[in-house]
Image (spheres, rainbow, N blue to C red):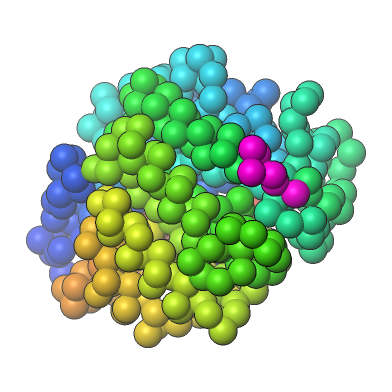
Amino acid sequence: MIESITKETTMNDRLFTSAQLGNLTLKNRIVMAPLTRSRAIGNLPNELMAEYYRLRADAGLIITEGTSPSHNGLGYPRIPGLFNDEHVQGWRSVTDGVHQAGGRIFVQLMHTGRISHPANLPAGARVLGPSAIAAPGEMWTDSEGMQPHPVPHVMSEADIAQSIREYAASAKLAIQAGFDGVELHAANGYLIDQFLNTASNQRDDRWGGPVENRIRFAVEVARATVNAIGAERVGMRISPYGVFNGQLPDPDMDALYLHLIKELNALGLLYIHIVDHSAIGAPEVSPELKSAIRDAFNGLYILSGGYDVARANADLDAQRGDLVAFGRPFISNPDLVTKLASGQNLVEPDSSTFYTPGEKGYTDY
């Protein structure tokens, strides 16, 4: 439940001060976290989505819902794509609205990989993954209801190379569409994370096995994206110790992520955004690993996970991070920044409308 937030301090709190993100000046340190909302009919961004994001432009930075860089990555119903001119035109209405309202916006590039079903994919697309291991559980399809996750096609060297190129091409289209940058979704059991995690990656070639191999896909996607649009426009989201979508920790997890951070430093990546869903019942991310990543990474660090104003200010003051992401509160509180600053009660979201089409529970709060 979202509780009211007691405002005991003033608008001079660090959370509400400006911050520099690469070449961008953010008006506050509040980030709207990426939130899947499934309103992209035909996988196309639309005017309803443009209104939704424009209403939340008071955030220092908006990160969009997961957006596929490939027809193969459209694994959920009604998620948007960014791999053709029609997508660019749709997203342009979103970015124009946010910029006109004084906001900044990054697109999150998310290839769903094995978290998919053929019924959710366009003709000719394939469910891909590092290994022939189906994710546990089921997923919703608009045409067939709940369906079990299928066994993915094992990605060949050619498939891997093509996917890396798709991320870079999508990043270029993002800049054409007016985005200020991109976040590579390497968390929560989607394609990049599937290569990182031994629950989904049991390859014995240069893309699997030891940590230096399992991080290779993440690093090469980041490298290609940086080469396409510049390191000052590229961040990455990661979820160490996450179990969403069938992922599991392993004994090398800390070493894997610290090795990944070292490689991302060499590329000059703009920020790291760590998923921590322990506030809603997920396993806690190792505090020691979070601290070690903070110390090792040269770029900015986005905190997340059930924050209120007091905790956000405390962690910012302690330099545990540079920006703070808020997720679900933004769903039902488009004016969240104002409410956080003034201590107003927050409206509770209607979870039954999180992933349904239409304005109900989306732009009608």
Is 143 left, or right, of 357 in this rendering?
A: right
Question: Could you tell me residue 206's position as x and y percent?
Answer: 58, 58
Question: Could you tell me residue 322's position as x and y percent?
Answer: 23, 62
Identify the image quadrant of residue 341.
Answer: bottom left
Is 249 left, or right, of 119 in this rendering?
A: left
Question: Could you tell me residue 160's position as x and y percent?
Answer: 60, 43
Residue lying at 51% horizontally and 70% vertically, measured from the top left: 211
Residue 340 is at least partly visible in this image: no
87 over 130 or under it: above or below: above
Where does the magenta region start and end?
Answer: 154-159
Residue 95 belongs to the span the image colors magenta: no
Is 221 left, or right, of 30 in this rendering?
A: right
Count the numbered circles shown: 0
Identify the image quadrant of residue 208.
Answer: bottom right
Residue lying at 33% horizontally and 72% vertically, measured from the top left: 293
The front one of 323 and 290 is 290
Residue 75 is at least partly visible in this image: yes
